[in-house]
Image (cartoon, helix red, strand yellow):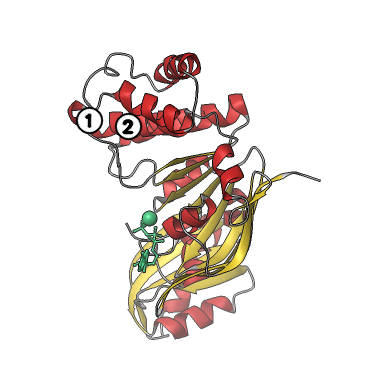
Amino acid sequence: MTELAIEARGLVKRYGDLTAINGIDLAVPAGTIFALLGPNGAGKTTTINILTTLILPTAGEACVAGHDVVRAADKVRQRIGVTFQDIVVDQDLSGREVLDIHGRLYRQPADERRRRIAELVDLVQLNEAIDRRVRTYSGGMKRRLELARGLMTDPAVLFLDEPTQGLDPQNRVGIWGYIRELNRTRGLTLLLTTHYMDEAEALAGQVGIVDKGRLVADGNPDTLVAALGADVIRVRGQGDCAHFAGQVAGLPFVDRVDTNAEGDMVMVYVDSGSRRLAEVVGTAGGNGFHIDDVTVARPSLGDVFLHYTGHALRD
Ligand SMILES: Nc1ncnc2c1ncn2[C@@H]1O[C@H](COP(=O)(O)OP(=O)(O)OP(=O)(O)O)[C@@H](O)[C@H]1O
Ligand SMILES: [Mg+2]
């Protein structure tokens, strides 16, 4: 039996009439990189805030590193690290001070703090900048400092809320490298949230797709994608989209068909896009659907998202 680093059952959080999350279940084996993928307002930060003991659930329960997040919140806090979506550090402090204060908060002795800081500054490559005020850091440097702060207490489970939000592609790939290295070399369990599909694809051994406070699908990204079909033919056009989709669904080689909420796009999942393209396109003729554009591709997590939610994952 695999040990679960994070386990949640039926987590609900309500704010008055608003339900931020509505029954989230999670089972994250130790040593996994797990990505909660979803659009703005899906409930990702709310879920992280419950798992990291910052807020109480309205209903449901969760264990992190073997401890209940409500009844044993102190024990959970000793085993985890967190980096926040909005960077909260005092910009007038130096990077070193930020890390040192964090260690003090957790009552780490001075020599241990010094040792950790030296090691982490190396890891996130902030050697040059560590004694400068955070105010002078670039966005990428601030994120790296945040990552180091989350690691000060040598956690068993690290929570990263939107670790690359607002970063340029080069800095994002850099952060991905640190995340992979932490997972590979220390066996750290990581739960990160993201609204970037490519981030979940690049990093996660397991992904949980959240929308409107619910976990609509979870599993290995490749498995989720492969379950849709080998190839997707995306047909954009005008007219009776639903009728066209129904006709295509009746073709013997079609695995499944999705349509977008706008009603101008049909996704046809097939065994081989290039072989089936002509017949799929041919079905439109005389069926009240005028095709503007067709593409053939391998399905992505974006298609998985659309399949389970009925709408596209947009930034
Ligand atoms: N303290 C609060 N009081 C009232 N509503 C809240 C509070 N915190 C979150 N919400 C609401 O709960 C829902 C989920 O918010 P949450 O921050 O968890 O989403 P998210 O998935 O992290 O979104 P984003 O991608 O924008 O960070 C939203 O509708 C949000 O407005
Ligand atoms: Mg959030």
Report whether 174 appears left or right of 277. Answer: left
Q: Position of residue 11 (x, y in %)?
A: 57, 66
Question: Quarter containing ligand 1?
Answer: bottom left
Rendered image quadrant of residue 2: top right
Report whether 219 appears left or right of 214. Answer: right
Residue found at x 48% / y 13%: 111
Near mark 2 (Cα within 10 A), the count class, few <14, some 14-19 or many ≥20, is some
Q: Is residue 110 above or below residue 311?
A: above
Total label count?
2
Please state, as top left, top right, bottom left or bottom right, where the C terminus lies in the image: bottom left
Residue found at x 43% / y 33%: 105
Report whether 310 appears left or right of 166. Answer: right
Q: Nearer the viewer, residue 231 or 138?
A: 138
Q: Position of residue 184 (x, y in %)?
A: 59, 28
Q: Position of residue 100 (x, y in %)?
A: 38, 24
Please tell me whether mark 1 sits on a helix, a strand or a loop.
Answer: loop
**Which circle's residue, 1 or 2, is located before the other in the chain?**
1
Verify CB contact (< 8 Å) between mark 1 and mark 2: yes
Residue found at x 50% / y 17%: 112
Report whether 302 appears left or right of 222. Answer: left
Near mark 1 (Cα within 10 A), the count class, few <14, some 14-19 or many ≥20, is few
User: Circle 1 is placed at which residue position?
Assistant: 138
User: Circle 2 is placed at which residue position?
Assistant: 171
Q: Amino acid at mark 1?
A: Ser
Q: CA distance from mark 1 to mark 2?
A: 10 Å
Please tell me whether mark 2 sits on a helix, a strand or a loop.
Answer: helix
Q: Is residue 62 visible?
A: yes
